[in-house]
Amino acid sequence: MKTNNSLTPSYFQFTVFADYGPLRYLLFSLSLLIYITIISANVAIVLSVCLETSLHQPMYIFICSLCLNSLYGSTGFFPRFLMDLLSDTHFISFPFCFLQVYITNTYLGHELTLLTIMAYDRFVAVCQPLHYHSKMTFRTVLLLLIFAVLYPLCVLGFFVYHVSSLPLCENQLPRIFCTIWVIIKLPCVDTTVISIASQIIAVISVFIPLFFVLYTYLHILLVCRRGSSEFRGKALQTCLPHIVTFGNFCISLFCEFSMTMYNVEEVNTFSIALSLEFLIIPPIMNPLVYGLNLPQIKGVIFGFLRAEKMVRST
């Protein structure tokens, strides 16, 4: 179970998987359906933005990036989870466990930075429309996307690497996937300082973007109040999907942070469901919200479907 060079186990064991018998096949089918839905919905948005030149605008590029991130995060969880549902043993190697930790956490970081950037994009579009094209240039959009990708990768990469280098005395994970908040309790050395520092960094990383988004949308609401009814309608049409998406993501973060407060012995079905919220709901909700509420994207998707139907009928 342990390596020769250190106390660190060579694998971890998920301890909350129960023997569901034939029910496991129902859970597997439901989970596979959710995964296929996530892939199909997000790929539809990505292809619509990439193939339709009229959607090559900052807002739609950010939406495309959000959907790509949903595919990234879901792929870091579902394949392994589906395999565990059908397996009689639930072991994961040390490197793959930390790889899953890295993917799921960077997925959260990318989502947060992208939603913050999208709030800034809507702020400029509504509050400073005459300067929008001069501020949101292709170079600016590219730099913002690079920052949104590299910042979580670097910050979380350093943190995950530091935790992975600690000697671990246990290999029992009371979760259905690898999470840093559980692993950080397993080292043989005292990790109180690391745990507190990580929680402080997590709170700061969440609340600064949250306050920025609230600040931008407060300004947007003030501008909409002074505008005409037509202006308010157009502004809400583009801003409402982002408000819904950001609100849904905040609920997901709350559920994830709530899980960190559970003791190992208190893990139950409800807490497991909470831990999956951020990996399931946003990847499904994001493409549906944007695909159904933005007529430009909806028109492109329906156009593709009509064209495919005509090709099949000929």
Image: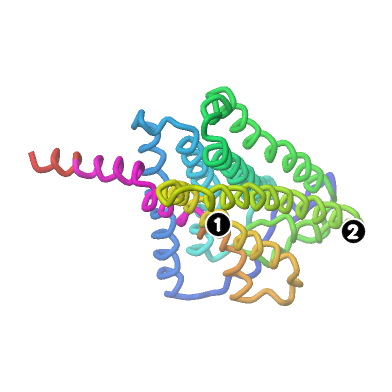
Residue sitting at 74 percent across and 76 percent down?
A: 265
Distance, label 2 to label 1, CA atoms, is 28 Å
Specify start and end residues of the magenta stretch as a single range. Answer: 282-306
Residue 109: image tag: none
The reply to whether residue 71 is in sight is: yes
Q: Is residue 293 above or below residue 300?
A: below
Among the two numbered marks 2 and 1 on one chain, the one whose residue lies closer to the N terminus = 2
Percent across and percent down for residue 236 are: 46, 51
- Tell me the residue at 52%/54% (across/down): 245
Image spot of residue 150 (x, y percent): 66, 34
Q: Is residue 283 magenta?
A: yes
Q: What residue is shown at x 73% (from left), y 71% (from top)?
A: 262
Query: What is the magenta segment's predominant secondary structure?
Result: helix
**Is disc 2 placed on a helix, strand or loop?**
helix
Task: Residue under label 2, please give it.
Answer: 192
Query: Which residue is at the front of the view, 130 or 45?
Result: 130
Looking at numbered disc 2 in the image, what kind of residue is underneath it? Answer: Thr
Residue 279 marker: 1
Q: Residue at the location (45% across, 56% down)?
A: 284
To which quarter of the image does residue 246 belong? bottom right
Residue 263 position within the rendered picture, expressed as x and y whole percent measured from the top left: 76, 72
> Does 280 sit above or below residue 6?
below
Query: Could you say where residue 151 lies in the image, as x and y percent from the top left?
Result: 70, 36
Instruction: Indicate the secondary structure of the residue bearing disc 1.
Output: helix
Instruction: Please say whether residue 39 is visible from this viewpoint.
Output: no
- Which is nearer the eye, 52 or 163? 52
Find out whether residue 210 is within the magenta segment: no
- On the rendered image, what quadrant is the N terminus found in? bottom right
- Quarter of the image that includes the C terminus: top left
